C-alpha cells in the first residue's frame, strides 16, 4: 500500500478535528489572546471558538481562514501535524 493511501486511511474526521483543535489552542495561547479576543477578531462567537478548541465541531474553510487571521498564522498550519511537545518548564 502506498504512503498516500495509508495516510488517507489513518486520518479520520475526528482525528483532523482534534488536530485543528490542538493547533488553534496552541497558536491562540502563543499569540497571547483570550478566547473572547480571538473570537472577536475572527468574527465568531466565543462559544463557537471554544467548541473548535474542544474538537466538538466541524470547521469550514471560511472559518479556518478567520481563525488563522485572528491568531496570526497561516490557516494551513492549523491542519498540519503539530510539532512534538517540548519538555515542561
Image (tube, rainbow, N blue to C red):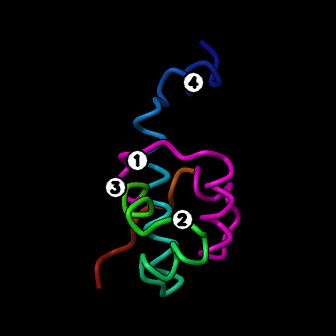
Looking at the image, tell me whether mark 3 or mark 1 is earlier in sequence order.
1
Q: Is residue 16 above or below residue 10?
A: below
* Residue 88, numbered circle: none
- Give the mark, 4 or 3, whose residue is nearer the N terminus: 4
- Whole-percent x, y for residue 64 in the image: 62, 55
The residue under the point 44% across, 63% down is 49
Residue 74, percent from left and from top = 70, 64
Mark in front: 3 vs 1: 3
Image position, residue 8 (x, y; %): 57, 24
Select label 1 or label 4 by which is in front. 1
Q: Secondary structure at mark 3?
A: helix
Q: Which residues are magenta?
A: 53-79
Q: Residues within 10 Å of mark 3 (few under 14, many from 20)?
A: some
Where, by quadrant of the figure, is residue 76 drawn?
A: bottom right
Picture disc at residue 44? 2
Q: Is the Cβ of the residue at disc 3 closer than 8 Å to that at disc 2?
A: no
Going from N to C along the chain, the mark reached first, 3 or 2, is: 2
User: Which residue is denoted by mark 4 in the rendering?
Assistant: 8
Q: How far is disc 4 from disc 3 in space, using C-alphas? A: 23 Å
Amino acid at each position: 500500500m502506498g504512503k498516500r493511501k495509508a495516510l488517507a486511511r489513518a486520518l479520520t474526521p475526528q482525528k483532523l478535528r482534534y488536530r485543528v483543535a490542538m493547533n488553534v489552542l496552541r497558536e491562540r495561547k502563543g499569540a497571547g489572546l483570550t478566547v473572547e479576543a480571538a473570537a472577536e477578531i475572527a468574527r465568531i462567537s466565543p462559544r463557537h471558538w471554544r467548541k473548535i478548541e474542544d474538537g466538538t465541531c466541524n470547521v469550514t474553510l471560511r472559518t479556518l481562514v478567520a481563525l488563522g487571521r485572528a491568531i496570526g498564522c497561516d490557516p494551513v498550519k492549523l491542519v498540519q501535524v503539530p510539532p512534538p511537545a517540548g519538555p515542561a518548564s
